[in-house]
Amino acid sequence: MNSDWDLAVVGAGVAGLTAARVAAEAGLRVVAYDRMTPGGQLVNLTTLHDVPEPGEVTSSAGLLGRLVAEAEAAGVTMSFAEVTRVRAGAAPRLETSEGEVGARAVVVATGLTAGRLGLPGEELLVGRGISTCAGCDGPLFRGRAVAVVGDDDWTAEEALELAEVATAVTVLVPGQPRWSGERVGRLAASARVEVLTGATVTALRGEGVLSGVVVATAGSERELAVDGLFPYVGRRGPGALVDGLPTDEAGRLRTEGGVRTAVPTVFVAGDARSAATGSVPSAGADGEAAGAAAVAMLRPAGGPGLRIVDPTFGVQPADSAAEAQAGGTADWSEVALFSNSKPNATELLRGVGERLQEHWELPELGFASKPNASAAADKDVIDWLSQRYKMVLVAVGD
Ligand SMILES: Cc1cc2nc3c(=O)[nH]c(=O)nc-3n(C[C@H](O)[C@H](O)[C@H](O)COP(=O)(O)OP(=O)(O)OC[C@H]3O[C@@H](n4cnc5c(N)ncnc54)[C@H](O)[C@@H]3O)c2cc1C
């Protein structure tokens, strides 16, 4: 193995943090890159709607804190660097703002770019009236008029949040809204919200600071005086970040069904995936699937080479047929490794395991770990280790 990492995760939002945690819990050496702070879209949201179930709400900060803590406890290394290119292949290489690294597998979980209308002068007005974060910037528009552009459930929720501070919120829907019937009712019930369908913003007004937009609807055009504009359309996927992977019209990466791509070492999770539904629960489910797929790819059950037998992740010890395959002087069930989940301890055990495999021709090793460094070891796991193995090598790191 000649890689810096077993798994490199690009993007530490819901999908990336989940994929990284799942892979690290299975004993892989995992790095998660983010060009900003971890959390992705969660950083921009205060209340999450339809999380964990439709109709329920969750605190975004609470979920973010839990995802980061779980990933770190599992041993994920967080790196605050931008990944600028993924060279896919049997031995993927990543170009990052801090240099080049190798990984045996990659999960792309970059999400989408911020919403944009694609109009002249737009970038100059970002932060000067244009925002895509109602939770952060909404209070700046207390007592003022704003416009919101979009057609999905999250656009409706952002508009309703803004209506708590702004005097008027005009929701400009490019075609017809896709939001739920329940949201139709809540928008209609707000005296401060007006919804215009079939509405296109054709120009921005303002010198240095936004003062209005030009809106075209059904053949007519009108000026709308607003101090704030929140575009949730025009969001783009990671496009050409990964060599040779096809994209859809929004620049999201196409997969071969689920999170797998045409390149066996590359997986895509969350909003970056073509056909993603764009919600926190679906990003989490993608992350679980991508982490598990990376583990299965790097550590095929029953395949050649070292097989890790780990009771905490549901892998059953092999039957007697596996024992019959064992060569050398050691039986497969003689040696197990135990770590406290800290990366340096897991790294040490990995090295010891590889050498034992080589010298004693071990087809399998037992492996167990504490869920995190500060938790007590599970009694069932201690029993399993002591009853099943003649030798348990323990490494603890801090
Ligand atoms: C306004 C709005 C409101 C929403 N409200 C809800 C809601 O109430 N309920 C709900 O279920 N869903 C909601 N959603 C959808 C939900 O937030 C997303 O579907 C989900 O968070 C996507 O997670 P992700 O991990 O795929 O991507 P993201 O959360 O976008 O995370 C991607 C991460 O990748 C990083 N990154 C990108 N490119 C690179 C690179 N090249 N190198 C390194 N790092 C990189 C980014 O910095 C980011 O941290 C909302 C979305 C929006 C836009």
Image (tube, rainbow, N blue to C red):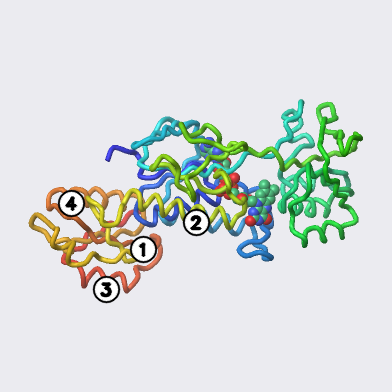
Select label 2 or label 3 by which is in front. Answer: 3
Contact check, label 2 and label 3, Cβ < 8 Å: no
Give the residue at mark 1: 313
Select label 3 or label 1 by which is in front. Answer: 1
Q: Amino acid at mark 4?
A: Gln
Secondary structure beneath disc 3?
helix
Give the residue at mark 3: 383
Q: Position of residue 319 (x, y in %)?
A: 21, 67
Contact check, label 2 and label 4, Cβ < 8 Å: no
Name the residue at 21% across, 63% down: 392
Lower position in the chain sequence, tag 2 or tag 3 = 2
Q: Quadrant of residue 117?
A: top right
Give the residue at mark 4: 357
For label 4, being within 8 Å of ligand 1 is answered no
Secondary structure beneath disc 2?
helix
Contact check, label 1 and label 4, Cβ < 8 Å: no
| Quarter that holds the N terminus | top left
Q: Position of residue 89 (x, y in %)?
A: 37, 35
Lower position in the chain sequence, tag 3 or tag 1 = 1
User: Gap in Å between the C-alphas at discs 3 and 4?
Assistant: 24 Å
Q: Quadrant of residue 332?
A: bottom left
* Pointer 2 local density, CA inside 10 Å: few below 14, some 14–19, many at least 20: some
* Pointer 3 local density, CA inside 10 Å: few below 14, some 14–19, many at least 20: few
Q: Position of residue 161 (x, y in %)?
A: 78, 54
Lower position in the chain sequence, tag 2 or tag 1 = 2
* Label number found at residue 360: none
Name the residue at 49% across, 52% down: 287
